[in-house]
Amino acid sequence: MSNGPIALTLGDPAGIGPEIIVKAWNELRHTGHPFMVVGDFQSLASASVAGASILRRVTAPADAVKAFPAALPVLDIPLRSPVVAGQPSSMAASAIIRWIETAVGLALSNVVSALVTAPIAKAPLYEAGFRFPGHTEFLGELTAAASFDGARGPVMMLAARDLRASLVTVHEPLAEVSGALSVQGIVNAGLVTAQALRTDFGIEAPRLAVAGFNPHAGESGKLGREEVDIIAPAIRALRHLGVDATGPWPADTLFAEEIRRRYDGAVCLYHDQALIPVKMLDFWGGVNITLGLPIVRTSPDHGTAFDIAGRGQARADSLVAALKLAREIAQRRSA
């Protein structure tokens, strides 16, 4: 992996991304790993009480490393028209997509050490023709042609304190999750998760706990067949492949503090099954990690918060945690 700075995409410029980026730089500029914003210079200037005086346009990652202690480095890819904080617009969609594509290209070229993405809003992008459910799936597409040694993602993981929870399905409507579950999908998520726990989190012999889908993990098929027909066979397959996987465990007890000591990663079956316990455990400091990619990618575990954008109220805790974790994973991959 590169020793270069982290590439941090601006996210939706009408959201809290610009504000929390400035706050993260203020917190990390003397002690954190350097990062470089890929986005619109003016949006960042508008988000800072100091305006453009704390920013510096750069054209190369090496310049960002030199500038970082004194100024927030920006690879400026301007918006075609200005945005108003709190008012998302599909007019910004092409720029938002270009920022992501540019940052991924830098990561694949190994001139930045990792990618961190500020939040995007799906609806304005969908209006402009964006065809991916979210960042995770888009990053999978952008990195699909690059070589990667091991089980391939993208698999979403949420991390907070001692809880790491990966997802088998991500943005499917709840009514469609059962039909989207498969033995192969659970096995792949388990393989990717176990591999990431070793290479990215430094856990030599990771233990996985696979959640059940139905109440009480289905009560041996009496409350649903997913555990019997899909989840248990997937766990057996994972164990046959050398992964220490157990379950299916009832989700209502899987995340208690005492139970969390028994595993290193939880494999969850749908979005809220993972995100609710993560956000209950650490609402402000959770991090989203994309596993199984040839690049390191993290992001804050929250959205654009248009309702408070531009008011100076947004907290940067989750972005700071995402930047720190991205650096740690990049360092482990380089070791």
Image (cartoon, rainbow, N blue to C red):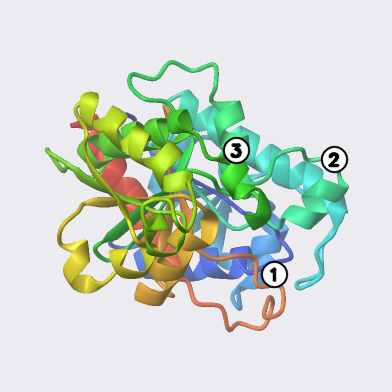
Which residue is rendered at x = 39% and y = 46% of the image? 66
Taking the spot 47% from the left edge, 23% from the top edge, the residue there is 109
Q: What residue is pinned by disc 3?
A: 137
As helix, strand or loop, the secondary structure at mark 1 comes to: helix
Is label 3 in a helix, a strand or a loop?
Answer: helix
Q: Where, quadrant-wise, is the N terminus in this rendering?
A: top left
Mark-to-mark CA distance, 3 and 2: 15 Å
Q: What quarter of the picture does the C terminus occupy?
A: top left
Label 1: few (<14), some or many (≥20) within 10 Å? some
Q: Nearer the viewer, residue 40 or 107?
A: 107
Q: Identify the residue under disc 2.
A: 129
Instruction: Kindly identify which residue carries mark 1.
Output: 46
Q: Amino acid at mark 2?
A: Gly
**Percent of width and height locating residue 14:** 74, 65
As drawn, the label of residue 260 is none
Residue 297 is left or right of residue 43, and the answer is: left
User: In the rendered structure, which amino acid carries the disc numbered 3?
Assistant: Glu
- Residue 215 seen: yes
Q: Is residue 281 left or right of residue 176?
A: left
Separation of disc 2 and disc 1 at Cα? 28 Å
Residue 141, horizontal then vertical, whole percent: 61, 28
Answer left or right for 222 relative to 243: right
Q: Earlier in the sequence, mark 3 or mark 2?
A: 2
Q: Is residue 172 above or below residue 261?
A: above
